[in-house]
Image (cartoon, rainbow, N blue to C red):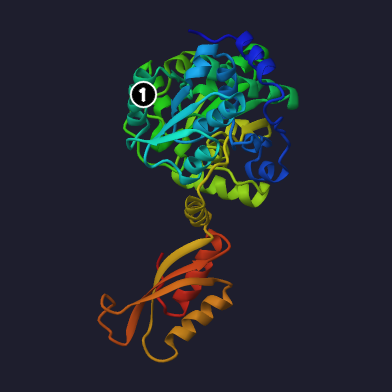
């Protein structure tokens, strides 16, 4: 079953008034950081923190009376589950969600608060989906795929209609890609209304199922590795989504974990926005210099999700600071006599570095028993600042190496 542009416009009418009308403002600091004219579509402002509500509301509204009475089910790591649970609750439809056991805690807890029955099963989305299929057969529930159901794809495509109204002269939209439902809906709408606008997909290197599908010519299962962009960690893109997106997506790029962490950090610092790794993927591609052809162009970034565990956020901040050269680790050799550590700390203070942690390593130091290795974690301004600190330490005989 295909999806048409008319399906998207009908979905827009159907969901109107039931979701947050998210703004798409110009970001001056992100524009300065990337060399592009950056506009951010703030989808993390939706009630459940992501764009997934669009497709969920549309799909639920299209259910027949008997389907509504029996209820719906989905396998999801989080955002689709939240959107489905929330709008099912509003519409009085029973909702069941099967999550992998590693699902982010904040998404699991919030899903239960929204009235859904949450079942933890399996370690991957595929295993969760297999269990959901068993429940469908047992209880007669309607399964709603989070990225390949035609009604879901049409709902997600409504983002593009809003973007084209909010930034009518845009040159490109950079879209995070997981199961490909979002980019399929956006690409379908954009290429129908403004075929000259570039639609560019971004995937994490560690979960590049859309790229694998492009290579194979069809969706194929991939072996994934853990990624900060957990919302994009889908082992196989949807068949409907791929068929829609493949001829309409102009380019796809891959981002690494350091780029994702840095993008989350930049959004917090520059936009005061807490966005999960998947939601920050578009910015990650820009900051990593993967799209030089967009320099000076009007570019829209859908910040599509803001549901991130606080424990994970702390790790991402540290990873981002390290990628940015503002949290650095190095080893130095100091005198083990009184005053040796004090002199070492004084040099760091004079250079404007703040010591976060320091550990002595006497057992594996050099042969001189009067000297000891120290492993330091320090806060610095950037990579250039770190190089200056190391140069200063080495001039003072501390033999510092990163």
* Residue at (32% x, 87% y) in the render: 370
Vertical placement of 139 versus 393: above or below? above
Circle 1: element type = helix
Q: Which residue is at the front of the view, 170 or 301?
A: 301
Q: As rendered, which of 312 and 64 lies closer to the eye? A: 64
**Location of mark 1 (residue):** 135
Position in image of residue 167 (x %, y %): 73, 27
Q: Is residue 245 visible?
A: no
Q: Residues within 10 Å of mark 1 (few under 14, many from 20)?
A: some
Residue 157 visible to an observer of this rendering: yes
Residue drawn 67% across and 28% down? 19
Q: Is residue 311 left or right of residue 53?
A: left
Vertical relation: 240 (above or below) 231: above
* Percent x, y of residue 338: 41, 92
Residue 28 placement: quadrant: top right
- Residue 114 location, x and y as percent? 55, 36
Spot occupied by residue 365 in the image (x, y as percentages of width and height): 29, 77
- Residue depicted at x 58% and y 9%: 4
Relative depth, front residue between 6 and 356: 6
- Answer left or right for 136 relative to 306: left
Please indicate whether residue 372 sits to the left or right of residue 285 in the image: left
Question: Which image quadrant is residue 204 in?
Answer: top left
Which quadrant of the figure contains the C terminus? bottom left
Q: Residue at x 47, y 63 (%)?
A: 328
Q: Quadrant of residue 208?
A: top left
């Amino acid at each position: 079953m295909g999806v048409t542009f008319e399906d998207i416009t009908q979905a827009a009418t159907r969901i109107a008034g039931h979701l947050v009308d998210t703004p798409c403002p110009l970001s001056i600091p992100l524009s300065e950081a990337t060399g592009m004219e950056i506009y951010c579509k703030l989808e993390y402002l939706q009630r459940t923190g992501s764009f997934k509500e669009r497709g969920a509301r549309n799909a639920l509204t299209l259910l027949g009376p008997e389907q509504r009475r029996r209820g719906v089910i989905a396998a999801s790591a989080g955002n689709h589950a939240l959107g489905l649970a929330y709008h099912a609750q509003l519409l009085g439809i029973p909702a069941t969600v099967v999550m992998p056991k590693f699902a982010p805690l904040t998404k699991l807890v919030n899903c239960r608060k929204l009235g859904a029955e949450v079942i933890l099963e399996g370690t991957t989305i595929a295993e969760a989906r297999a269990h959901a299929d068993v429940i469908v057969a047992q209880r007669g529930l309607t399964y709603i795929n989070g990225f390949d159901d035609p009604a879901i794809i049409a709902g997600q495509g409504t983002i593009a209609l809003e973007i084209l109204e909010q930034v009518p002269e845009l040159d490109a939209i950079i879209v995070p890609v997981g199961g490909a439902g979002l980019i399929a809906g956006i690409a379908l709408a954009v290429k129908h209304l403004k075929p000259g606008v570039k639609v560019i997909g971004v995937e994490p290197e560690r979960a590049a199922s859309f790229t694998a599908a492009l290579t194979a010519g069809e969706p194929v299962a991939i072996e994934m590795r853990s990624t900060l962009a957990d919302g994009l960690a889908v082992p196989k893109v949807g068949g409907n989504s791929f068929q829609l997106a493949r001829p309409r997506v102009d380019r796809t790029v891959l981002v690494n974990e350091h780029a994702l962490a840095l993008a989350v950090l930049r959004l917090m610092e520059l936009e005061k926005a807490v966005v999960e790794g998947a939601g920050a993927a578009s910015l990650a591609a820009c900051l990593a210099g993967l799209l030089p052809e967009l320099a000076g162009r009007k570019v829209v970034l859908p910040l599509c999700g803001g549901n991130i565990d606080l424990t994970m956020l702390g790790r991402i901040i540290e990873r981002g600071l390290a990628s940015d050269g503002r949290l650095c680790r190095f080893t130095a050799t100091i005198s083990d006599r009184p005053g040796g550590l004090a002199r070492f700390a004084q040099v760091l203070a004079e250079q404007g570095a703040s010591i976060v942690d320091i550990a002595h390593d006497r057992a594996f130091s050099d042969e001189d028993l009067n000297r000891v290795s120290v492993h330091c974690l320090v806060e610095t301004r950037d990579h250039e600042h770190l190089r200056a600190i190391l140069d200063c330490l080495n001039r003072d005989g501390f033999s510092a190496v990163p």
